[in-house]
Amino acid sequence: MKNLNRREFLKKTVGIASLSLIAPACFKANKKPNVLILFSDQHNKKVMGFENHPDVITPNFDKLAKESLVFDKAYCTVGISVPSRSSLLTGLMPRTLGLLHNIGHTSVMEDAVSMATVFKHNNYNTYAFGKRHVSSGIDAGWDVKKDHQYKPKDDDNYVSWIERKGQAKEFAEDWAAEFGRGPKGSSEFETKFPTADLGTRISKLPKEYTMEAYTKMETIKMIKDQAGKKNPFFCWATFYRPHQPYNPQQEYMDMYNVSEWGEGTKKGSGIKKPASFYEPTENLPPLLQSQRNGGNKVWNMDKAFKNEQIWRNYIGGYYALVTEIDHCVGEILNTLDEAGLEEETIVIYASDHGDFVGNHGMVEKCAVGQNVYEEILNVPLIIKYPGKTKKGQRTAELVNLADILPTLIDMLDLDTPEFKYPIQGKSLAKVLLNKGSMNREYLISESWSQAAVITKKYKLGIMLDPTVVHENWDYREFGDMFFDMEKDPLEIDNRINDKKYQKVIGKLREYFNDYVRVTPSTGKDELIKGT
């Protein structure tokens, strides 16, 4: 019987009826915990109150952190949305999926087993509300899914809902702050409006009609409905913000004084200037340099450096969007408590990647040459497992978003369907249950143009051959980047040519070569061959 898993062993030895005897007291007998993943797009990990941020106001995130285990060294598998989200939902790395950027389709994506499929296989009711931004088998397994994007022949999405509510023009003007027109849908949405400097403009929508309010509304309705259900639920409640276009509500924007640079005292003084705001442009990879110099006429960063009020509007607007999400998270968690489900629900908060928020004198994420910086790769990860995780603890274990699926399978003893592509993430159960360490030496975050090798102290950014996607953006001549994160937490002192670090740099290169050797490039090879 040594090869039996835990569930099979218990069936053989004590009988299935006895399983309830080993369940945590806070969970109902014979019913597994609910799982609620609260997820945002482009949330810089440091922009939360409990992270000692000098300005941002996030009382609900702060409360959740006090009730949870907080991961200080959690990283995305790649610093852009689609592949990062796909890793979360499949436990697979981008090179295996063939997703090293936001577009593409491979057979691996079709055959991948999604997180929702695993939960559905275990008789969970499965829900997704908000921005999914995934496709194929990765997006399979949902009983109910309501997207932010317009879907032809499907009225159950945010864009159709906002049109029915008579707010199409207001939302179109918000959306156009980055895109110059509304989203795909009716002619009302596709009305042209001017873009906005740094993609920032105060929202014209009433607060109950934002994309964040939509995710909150649908999630709250689901929780109230689930209170009387026999089966547990798995829900991925995902917010579009604080991703651009940056359209804060005036109510939240008013919480931040953006009229001047200040000391960040939270007492009405101006917001604090990012410490690396004036980093020399020549330090940055070429596309970031181009944007700093005005190469992108949506962001207009050259104009913003001449008039720093534009920068303060964007940074304050980003903080305001985080505060709006915090408010929505608070209402969702309050509903969970009121429904009597708090003590039988695992709650996870995470984001797919970060945003510069003015650090390195940059806006948003740039997406080429940014796949090295902490602001983009180090993501929030907060996990609350009532009766299991110790409250208010933090850990410096190296973890990534691909670890969440195997963690849930492990902790909840989930039966799994057959995986054509074995999960590559690792279970965090030992760390969460305070029973051991991950003992990871390094992590890899890999896009199509740049890979980062991350340890607890050091980081190596390797410029890659980009021809699989865009042959004109080959930045290998710029060279690789190396940061001693303990001595240089701002990552402004590239020591790639420093003789005293060459042994460490060589070791990190070995780590990357090891990763490439053991991580199948099945999907990436498909893309290269064009099959």
Image (spheres, rainbow, N blue to C red):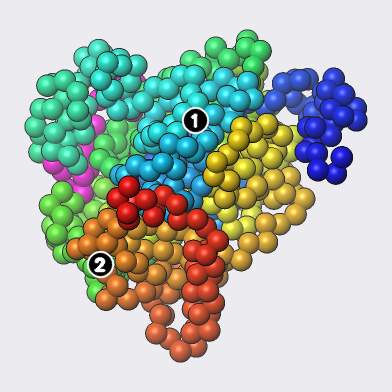
Check disc 1 and report its element: helix, strand or loop: strand
Q: Residues within 10 Å of mark 2 (few under 14, many from 20)?
A: some
Amino acid bearing label 1 = Trp
* Quadrant where the image shows the N terminus: top right
- The quarter holding residue 183 reads top left
Residue name at image x 63 percent, y 62 percent: 440
Residue name at image x 41 percent, y 80 percent: 495
Say whether residue 363 is left or right of residue 483: left
Magenta-colored stretch includes residue 78: no
Residue 474 shows which numbered tag?
2
Q: Residue furthest right?
A: 13
The magenta segment is 195-211
Residue name at image x 87 percent, y 29 percent: 12
The foreground one among 83 and 61 is 83
Residue name at image x 64 percent, y 25 percent: 122
Q: Which residue is mark 1?
A: 236
Give how far apart the Cα atoms at labels 1 and 2 are: 36 Å
The foreground one among 186 and 7 is 7
State whether residue 180 is above or below residue 123: below
Q: Residue 471, percent across and down?
A: 22, 62
- The quarter holding residue 201 reads top left
